[in-house]
Amino acid sequence: MVESSAGVGERLELFRTELTGYCYRMLGSGFEAEDAVQETLVRAWRSYDRYDAGRASLRTWVYRIATNVCLDMLRSAQRRTLAMDLGPASQAGAELGSPVAHQRWIQPIPDGRVLPMGDSPEELAVARETIRLAFVAALQHLPPRQRAVLILRDVLCWSADEVARLLETSVASVNSALQRARATLRVAGPAPGEPWRPADPAQRELLDRYCAAFERHDVATLVSLLHEDATMSMPPFAWWLRGRDQIRLALQDPRASCAGARLRPVAANGSPAFWQTRPGPDGRHVPFGLVLLDVRGGVITGIVTYLDIDRLVPLFDVGRTDEFAAAATYSLGPHPTIL
């Protein structure tokens, strides 16, 4: 019986979330991941009549298409990165400089687009860890095919034989690529984070204290919640700080005032995350920055605040909520807030 076009589309659509997670780790951008998945599903739908179930499962076949799409997109692309890889730490009070093109940054992604809801708690913990900004940034140090091998083997737990068939190569080549990729990550890999467990009372208390101190602009309490070597960055600027003392000086700068600002929880990159909002002209709060935190050992080790909100609002569907219905964005002046 010939399957209808609608039926084929429905079968392929079932792979969207996991494919988006795969493409995000490959490409380092939520925007590009969505484009890659859409291209993958279109190609699969158009060529479905040539799919041979005797040679590969539908999942393997779709992943092969997705891998080829990502490899094509990576051929001429610059490596995406975090601010810490662009240059040495700045000093508090230094000018932010000019924005860096968005194509250079690791971009965030909503959890709901990459974390399959049916995963077990253990699988979900691994999935969250492997979409952390630091982990995705470390993956970008790998050549594209090594990146695909490591993600498929170590993140998605495919067998070497499955990966070899997907990449149309030998098991020996897959194992060799995996060894080289693991060696690179041992050098360039991220500092271990603390798994984000939204229901964990200790983590909730830490974040509640952070949010309360932020909304009071209580610098002393905010700094007390940071690791001594904590980092702070604000894409799209290459400016970044390291250490509690530098962050304290920056937060005490009168130009960093966040009077009236709030933090609203959002699910992003498997990490504690918040929209930083400010009152708009009509008094309603609108997004100003997307804040992602790294937590380890009961303290905050990293704060990344994305300021290119005009690009992020559509990705996170913020405009669909009443609170952010007037999602007007603020101009990035010479001294945007650093909280």
Image (cartoon, rainbow, N blue to C red):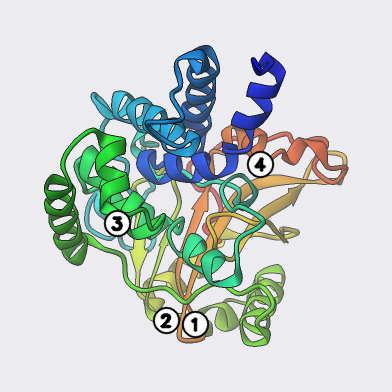
Name the residue type under label 3. Met
The residue wearing badge 3 is 84
Q: Earlier in the sequence, mark 2 or mark 1?
A: 2
Disc 3 to disc 1, C-alpha distance: 20 Å
Q: Is residue 31 left or right of residue 321?
A: left
Q: Which mark is residue 316?
A: 4
Disc 2 to disc 3, C-alpha distance: 17 Å
Residue 69 lies, in percent from the top left, at 37, 25
- The reply to whether the C-beta atoms of the residues labelled 2 and 1 are less than 8 Å apart is yes
Q: Quadrant of the C terminus?
A: bottom right
The residue wearing badge 1 is 299
Q: Secondary structure at mark 4?
A: loop
Residue 39 lies, in percent from the top left, at 49, 21
For discs 2 and 4, the disc positioned in front in the rendered view: 4
Disc 4 to disc 1, C-alpha distance: 27 Å
Name of the residue lying farthest toward the front: 1
Q: Secondary structure at mark 2?
A: strand
Q: Earlier in the sequence, mark 4 or mark 3?
A: 3
- Figure quadrant of residue 207: bottom right
Q: Quadrant of the N terminus?
A: top right
* Residue 101 visible, this orientation: no
Q: Earlier in the sequence, mark 3 or mark 1?
A: 3
The residue wearing badge 2 is 227
Name the residue: 64% across, 15% down.
2
Q: Is residue 176 left or right of residue 316?
A: left
Q: Nearer the viewer, residue 226 or 296?
A: 296
